Amino acid sequence: MTAPRARATAPAPRGDTASRELLLKAADALMTESGSADASLHAIARRAGVTAPLATYHFGSKQGLLLALVERVTGRSRGQMAALLALDVDARTRLRLHITGIVRTYARHPWLLALLNQLLRGPDEAAAARVKAEFVAPLIDTQRRIIEDGIATGQFRAVDPEQLYFIIIGACQYLFSARATIGAAMGDRPAQPAFARSFAGTVADIVMGGLNASDRDLERE
């Protein structure tokens, strides 16, 4: 009988926070450049200017390092979602801000989708549960609440919030997660901040236009 596989859940931070920070930044930079979640622990350590054993000391394993990076990014997003729901604005304004935030997150971290899928499907059940509870579920719930509020106030036509979730996330994710493969056709435009800002506005305009409650929709109610 083989021994159970060790969990890769990120350990609590240990000493020398400067080198820990360098490793997280190096992993982010390498995966952003490649547009994928593939980066070896040795490559990350080399980019950070430290040794691989030091990376293992801080995070336990490569997966532990990547989980810590995901938790940092999604933690910021979770805080922004909570602040968004607390804003005293209408559903249309709230949804536009939400879409813009999603686009910018994936533009800054084009590896995020691939790494989230890797963690959710991987053998570390504790890591998968944390990702679901701390990012995926809050993201779905935030968007559902915004859509339902817009429908209730007559700003949006009746739509399935879960279906709209896939439309918005799909539009925001693909361009940045696949930009390495479409670079030959578009050059480095998708990697430019100005493109991300413009794309966010385009996605928001199209979604908001499709959600407009028509007179016929309101008559049915």
Image (cartoon, rainbow, N blue to C red):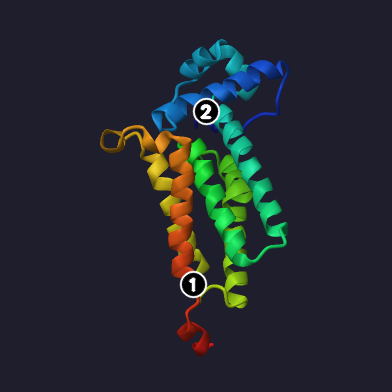
Residue 14 placed where, x, y %?
Answer: 72, 21
As drawn, 23 above or below 88: above
- Would residue 183 be found to the left or right of residue 86 on screen? left
- Would residue 44 be found to the left or right of residue 80 on screen? left
Of tags 2 and 1, which is closer to the observer?
Answer: 1
Residue density around tag 2, few if under 14, some if 14–19, many if 20 or more, within 10 Å: many
Visible residue check, residue 120: no
The residue under the point 65% across, 41% down is 76
Q: Secondary structure at mark 1?
A: loop
> Is the residue under label 1 in contact with that under label 2 (CB below 8 Å)?
no
Visible residue check, residue 88: yes
Look at the image and tell me in which quarter the C terminus lies: bottom right
Residue identifier under label 2: 28
Q: Earlier in the sequence, mark 2 or mark 1?
A: 2
Please tell me how many numbered marks the rendered image carries. Answer: 2
The residue under the point 60% across, 19% down is 22
Which picture quadrant has residue 97? Answer: bottom right
Q: Amino acid at mark 2?
A: Asp
Q: Secondary structure at mark 2?
A: helix
Residue identifier under label 1: 212
Residue 81 placed where, x, y %?
Answer: 65, 52
Residue nearest the observer in this picture, 138 or 180: 180
Residue 50 placed where, x, y %?
Answer: 57, 11
The residue under the point 57% across, 36% down is 70
As drawn, 56 above or below 213: above
Residue nearest the observer in this picture, 152 or 67: 152
- Would residue 115 be found to the left or right of residue 153 on screen? left
Q: Amino acid at mark 1?
A: Asn
For residue 92, the mark is none
Residue density around tag 1, few if under 14, some if 14–19, many if 20 or more, within 10 Å: some
The residue under the point 49% across, 42% down is 106
As drawn, 220 above or below 90: below
